[in-house]
């Protein structure tokens, strides 16, 4: 039965590719088929703008993929790649790339050729370092490298002037490059679960920054009152589960400055709730002031899994069954025997 199932699955994938070629389709979704090889035929789908290959068992991608000169979206997350496919670096129109949840410990310097890239996800791959060439991807707005073995970030990241959302949660970072001060567009910074021992002073220079997650680090160096006041422009500074949270002076400061999130003893909780309610009331009196896109940005992906972030197929089961029925004639040309 498994052999028959695999046979139909393979031929269904081929039929999908042929259908995309004939119809000059802009999108080809081959995700969730558990295929171990992507067909070379993909290279003939030259009209594609989006190609979804996530949730399979791919160990490599066909070299013919470089023929897709118009491709802007490529998802390869949740496969079995053991290195970053160099062919991707020739796809110069890519805007969205996801290689998360593979076994990719290094990115090649050629990744800097992807100068049109706007979103890059490389979560949970065992990545050891980010190449300095990542700074060449100057259009990057979203960069995710969570759950890796990164011990430092390259100073060249300061060149990412368009970067708005960066997460390196669950890595091994002990410091943040001073060049982060140049990230004039950065709104969301997630460094949860690293090895920071102090609040990075560079945060004070990033004026568009609104959400900072430093919880679950090793921060034991108490910031001065003036340093904390300089961070009042933040909507959220999460310091939970850091050694400094035991200091009563910081606890009392957090009660008054409602943007600091940390554990509070019971006798301060009521005061904190009252201050938060008063602060919320003041906000409601300012409804006539337009809310900017930056201040409206929330921590939309702080706890989401990669699979939740990158949903690529929203079709219903009924749609899939109808699709199979329509594809059977095309599949038949690949059928020789059982």
Image (cartoon, rainbow, N blue to C red):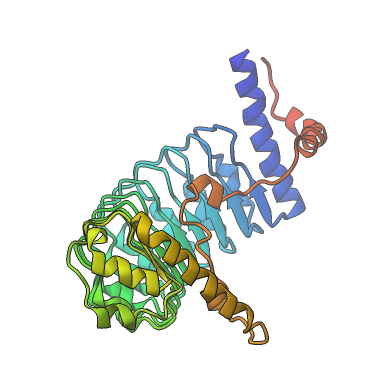
Relative placement, left or right, of 141 versus 328 is left
| Relative to 31, residue 250 above or below | below
From this view, report whether residue 6 is shown above or below residue 197: above
| The N terminus, quarter of image | top right
Q: Is residue 337 visible?
A: yes
Q: Position of residue 245 (x, y in %)?
A: 27, 60
Which residue is painted at 37% across and 46% down in the image? 124
Which of the 4 image quarters holds residue 80? top left
Which quadrant holds the C terminus? Answer: top right
Q: Which image quarter: residue 108? A: bottom left
**Front residue of this view, candidates 137 and 123:** 123
**Which picture quadrant has residue 30?**
top right
Residue 336 image point, x, y percent: 69, 21
- Decide: is 252 above or below 108: below
- Residue 14 image offset from top left, x and y in percent: 65, 36
Q: Residue, x 42% and y 71% (percent of image)?
A: 259
Q: Residue furthest bottom?
A: 289
Does the rendering let one see residue 145? Answer: no
Where residue 140 sits: x, y (%)?
45, 70
Question: Which residue shows up at 25% across the image and 72% down it?
Answer: 200
Q: What residue appears at the point 33 percent right and 61 percent down from the top-left corner?
A: 191
Residue at the top extreme of this rendering: 1
Q: How many marks?
A: 0
Along the line of sight, which residue is nearer the eye, 134 or 152? 152
Foreground pick, 277 / 325 = 277
């Amino acid at each position: 039965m498994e052999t028959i199932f695999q046979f139909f699955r393979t031929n269904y994938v081929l039929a999908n590719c042929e259908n995309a070629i004939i119809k000059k389709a802009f999108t080809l979704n081959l995700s969730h088929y558990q295929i171990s090889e992507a067909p070379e035929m993909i290279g003939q789908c030259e009209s594609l703008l989006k190609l979804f290959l996530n949730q399979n068992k791919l160990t490599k991608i066909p070299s013919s993929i470089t023929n897709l000169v118009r491709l802007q979206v490529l998802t390869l997350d949740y496969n079995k790649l053991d290195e970053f496919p160099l062919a991707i670096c020739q796809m110069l129109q890519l805007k969205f790339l996801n290689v998360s949840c593979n076994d990719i410990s290094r990115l090649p310097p050629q990744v800097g050729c992807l100068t049109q890239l706007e979103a890059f996800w490389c979560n949970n791959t065992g990545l050891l370092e980010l190449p300095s060439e990542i700074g060449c991807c100057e259009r990057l707005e979203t960069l995710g490298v969570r759950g890796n073995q990164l011990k430092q970030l390259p100073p060249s990241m300061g060149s990412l002037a368009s970067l708005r959302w960066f997460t390196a949660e669950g890595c091994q970072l002990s410091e943040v490059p001073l060049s982060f001060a140049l990230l004039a567009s950065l709104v969301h910074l997630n460094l949860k679960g690293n090895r920071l021992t102090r609040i990075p002073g560079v945060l004070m220079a990033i004026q568009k920054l609104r959400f900072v997650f430093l919880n679950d680090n090793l921060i034991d160096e108490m910031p001065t009152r003036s340093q904390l006041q300089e961070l009042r422009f933040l909507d959220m500074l999460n310091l939970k589960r850091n050694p400094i949270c035991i200091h009563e002076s910081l606890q009392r400061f957090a009660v008054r400055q409602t943007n600091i999130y940390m554990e509070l003893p019971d006798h301060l909780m009521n005061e904190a709730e009252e201050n938060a309610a008063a602060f919320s009331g003041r906000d409601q009196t300012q409804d006539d002031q337009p809310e900017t896109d930056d201040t409206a940005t929330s921590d939309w992906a702080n706890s989401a899994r990669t699979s939740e972030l990158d949903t690529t197929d929203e079709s219903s089961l009924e749609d899939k069954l109808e699709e199979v029925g329509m594809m059977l004639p095309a599949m038949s040309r690949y059928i020789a025997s059982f």
